[in-house]
Amino acid sequence: MAEATILYHDQSWRVRSGMTVRDAILKLELDPQTVLAVRDKRLINEETLIQPEDEIRLVNVISGG
Amino acid sequence: MSHVMRCTQCGAEAVINMPQHRLKLCGEHLVAWAAKMTQKAIDRYGLFTRDERILVAVSGGKDSLALWDILQQLDYASEGLYIHLGIDHEGYSDVSQEAAQRFADERGLTLHVLNVQAAYGKSVIEAARRRRGGRTCSVCGLVKRHIMNRMAYEGGFAAIATGHNLDDEAAVLLMNTLHWEGRYLSRQAPLLPAIHPRLARKVKPLVLLYEREMAAYALVRQIDYVMQECPYAQGASSIYAKGILNQIESQSPGSKHQFYLGFLRARESGLIASDGAADVPPETCARCGQPTTAGDLCAFCRLWEMAE
């Protein structure tokens, strides 16, 4: 089965391609309100379908302030 | 066939969904919309005018750099201030200063840097360590407020702009409400007027924007900001409060917006009364000349006296 990589902080996960970015965020037990997804240095929306061999970096949006 | 999220304004692929505004925007329209919302806050709350020079307090993080970027886009006369606090965990203060300087250099903007250790002989961390019961974050806030006032006064700036977004303000509001901090509630606003000749007006032009929108803006604009969190912010109550508010927002989009803007309206209509403390004119610190309500010396000068 084709897979893609999700990077968050210093960790990485392999996920099934074909799922949405939002589903991947939920699978990692993160709150979709608190992260954004970047692929090839470009921001992508949470309904984007993950393609085989994608490398998607999740960026935390919450800071202590 | 797969579904593609489209920009409400132009039909291109969207980069962000903002159900609280019933908007999905592409990068280009997100940038324009964020600038429009910032201008709306400037106008609605009377923050500053185009004739005034603004000092933007920049930390190297997404919000303050995005704010500076937007003010430049909107053609406001702004300069930056970076305060090097001496936080050496993984070079935090150095890395942040580099990010702020790089941002300014790339855009031909002026950045003022004040290094606390060089100017006052000790870093904020050392000062906090020597103050009995002094929590690092409260000491840091005290030092930053003093330096911002000093730099604004010396540089002849009309106002200090900070990158506080709606989530920052809603989190503070939640914590102050939980503890019924009447004095803080009566003073929480996008504009704090100057009530002393040495006290600068404080303004928050990003209060109509969610933190998520600011992060998206910074990513679309490819702003090279510091993602590392301040090591002292770990476990901060503001992060906890933001988490709770985001859980509510997930169930009911627009809740954060309603909570904060409803509070501002209630405050303006007199629902939250001042305890009178803000109406007492401050005195002048005998050492630095800045305002004080705590006797001869202001809290900043007392901190440094204790640390000596």
Image: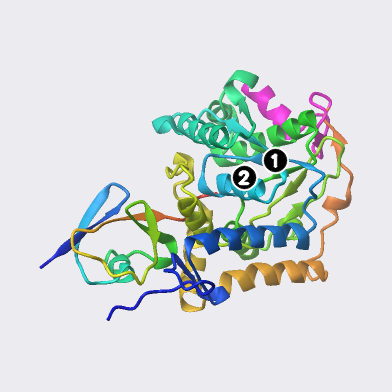
Residue B266 percent location from the top left of the image: 76, 71
Write the residue at 56% across / 62% down.
B210
Chain letter for mark 2: B
N-term-proximal mark, 2 vs 1: 2
Residue B147 vertical position relative to residue A56 in the rendered view, above or below: above
In depth, the one of A30 and B1 nearer the eye is B1
Q: Is residue B182 visible?
A: yes
Residue B10 percent location from the top left of the image: 51, 71
Q: Residues within 10 Å of mark 1 (few under 14, many from 20)?
A: many
Q: Amino acid at mark 2?
A: Trp
- What segment carries the magenta color? B286-308
**Labels 2 & 1 near each other (Cβ < 8 A):** yes
Residue A13 percent location from the top left of the image: 21, 57
Q: Are marks 2 and 1 on the same chain?
A: yes
Judge whether residue A32 is colored magenta.
no
Instruction: Kindly identify which residue carries mark 2.
Output: B68
The answer for how far apart the CA atoms under marks 2 and 1 are is 7 Å
The answer to which image quadrant residue B65 occupies is top right
Instruction: Kindly identify which residue carries mark 1.
Output: B78
In depth, the one of B34 and B192 nearer the eye is B34
The answer to which image quadrant residue B154 occupies is top right
Write the residue at 77% across / 32% down.
B298
Picture colour scheme:
rainbow
